[in-house]
Amino acid sequence: METKPSLTPRLRRWGKEALWLLLFAVIISTALDLWHSPALPEGSPLPVLTLQDGTQADLQAMSRDRPLLVYYWASWCAVCRFTTPTVEQLWRDGENVLTVALRSGDATRLQQGMAKKGLTFPTHNDEHADLAARWQVSVTPSFLIVKDGKVVSTTTGWSSGLGLKLRLAWANLG
């Protein structure tokens, strides 16, 4: 009588391999975030930015009462096609959000693109990447959490709405 091999050892081995892969992915992701993380110039105050609608956004004041999510994105960024709707939803849900469109065309072109996609979040057009250069933002999408005028958290690449909400909540505790 022939017996079939048990699935249990095989499942246990696959489980161990999956855990090692997950751990490896977390380490690589963390290393990439540290490498690509934006950095504000030491000792310089946060800028007051002009938004697409002509209003002024004082990042220092905006981050005083609750954490501010600063989202760097670009109209040409493939990953931003997935993250931008998430940030738009956070904005519509009442989160403190300001976005920076990086090299996404002049004001008219950016406004047309945003209208076409139904984007209403407040946006500063960094047409020539001047702000990105000062903040050392080299990757889109990039997310910065600012609390009381200081960057307390950064991440780059895809991020979920839940992940961003958790980062904002964590910053609010500090």
Image (cartoon, rainbow, N blue to C red):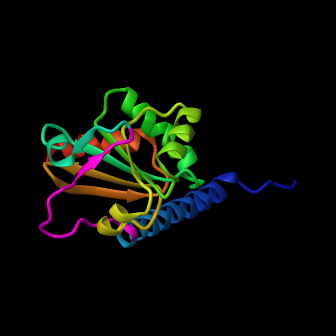
Q: Position of residue 27 (x, y in %)?
A: 42, 68
**105 sits left or right of 155 in the view:** right
**Residue 42 magenta-highlighted:** yes
Q: Residue furthest right?
A: 1
Seen at 14% across and 42% down, the residue is 61
**Residue 110 magenta-highlighted:** no
Seen at 41% across and 63% down, the residue is 129
Seen at 56% across and 59% down, the residue is 18
Instruction: Tell me: residue 117, above or below residue 50.
Output: above
Instruction: Tell me: residue 133, above or below residue 12.
Output: below
Q: Work out which quarter of the rendered image holds the N terminus and state it.
A: bottom right
**123 sits left or right of 81 in the view:** left
Task: Specify the quadrant of the image occupied by residue 94.
Answer: top left
Seen at 25% across and 43% down, the residue is 68
**68 sits left or right of 160 in the view:** left
Q: Position of residue 136 (x, y in %)?
A: 34, 69
Q: Nearer the viewer, residue 115 or 106?
A: 106
Secondary structure mostly seen in the magenta stretch: loop
Task: Specify the quadrant of the image occupied by residue 93.
Answer: top left
Task: Give the residues drawn in magenta, as a range.
Answer: 36-52
Q: Position of residue 102 (x, y in %)?
A: 45, 56
